[in-house]
């Protein structure tokens, strides 16, 4: 997992691969406050983004998830949210396996060693296949969020 902000990305980007740099460049180069929600192609099906408007909800109502074929970058445009985060472990119980159709596994709410990542506009978190994340959790109450979810093929 990587937790970063667009303002400080240029200092650390040389540590990461070309695909991740290309994905974050897309985040830096666009004004998502003026774009319509939807899917945006960056590099075919290797790198693409979804701009979404959502509402946060209590953590216990949000499902922890992970992905196997894509790195998941969660970038906050507006609002505030908590993303629960933990490393995968043998203690996780799969609630729903949608790997074949959606590259998505959902787990029951009990996630050992889960911590809260607090995101404000400009922040983004990068989740790899060994990372479990629980996005759109409320932080000091329900909040409307606009975010970009970038998928980077492994």
Image (tube, grey):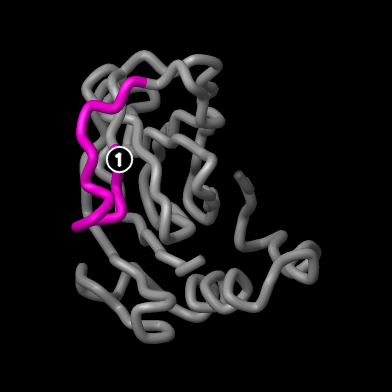
Mark 1, other Cα within 10 Å: few <14 / some 14–19 / many ≥20: some
Image location of residue 130, percent across then percent down: 54, 41
> Is residue 107 found inside the magenta-colored segment of the image?
no
Q: Residue at x 30, y 75 (%)?
A: 34
Indicate whether 43 appears above or below 124: below
The structure residue drawn at horizontal position 48% and vertical position 51%, both measured from the top left corner, is 121
Tell me, yes or no, if residue 149 can be seen here.
yes
**In the displayed structure, does residue 130 sit left or right of residue 42?**
right
Seen in the picture, residue 95 relative to 21 is either above or below; the reply is above
Quarter of the figure with residue 81 = top left
Q: Nearer the viewer, residue 110 or 11?
A: 110
Q: Quadrant of the N terminus?
A: top right
Q: Is residue 152 left or right of residue 34?
A: right
| Magenta-tinted stretch | 93-105
Q: Secondary structure at mark 1?
A: strand
The question of residue 102 being in magenta is answered with: yes
| Pointer 1 residue | 105
Residue at 53 percent across and 50 percent down: it is 128
Residue 23 in the image, given as x and y percentages of width and height: 52, 73
- 138 displayed left or right of 95: right
Vertical placement of residue 87 versus 124, above or below: above
Residue 75 position in % (x across, y down): 45, 56
Q: Position of residue 13 (x, y in %)?
A: 73, 68
Between 65 and 92, the one nearer to me in the picture: 92
């Amino acid at each position: 997992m990587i937790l970063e902000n667009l303002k400080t990305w240029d200092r650390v980007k040389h540590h990461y691969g070309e695909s991740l740099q290309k994905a974050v460049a897309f985040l830096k180069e666009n004004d998502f406050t003026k774009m319509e929600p939807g899917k945006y192609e960056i590099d075919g099906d290797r790198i693409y983004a979804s701009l979404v408007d959502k509402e946060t909800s209590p953590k216990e109502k949000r499902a922890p998830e992970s992905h196997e074929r894509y790195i998941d970058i969660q970038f906050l445009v507006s609002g505030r949210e908590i993303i629960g985060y933990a490393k995968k472990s043998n203690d996780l119980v799969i609630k729903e396996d949608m790997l074949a159709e959606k590259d998505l596994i959902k787990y029951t709410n009990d996630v050992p060693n889960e911590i809260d990542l607090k995101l404000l506009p400009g922040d983004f978190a990068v989740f790899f296949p060994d990372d479990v994340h629980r996005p759109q959790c409320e932080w000091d109450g329900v909040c409307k969020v606009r975010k970009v979810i970038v998928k980077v093929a492994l």
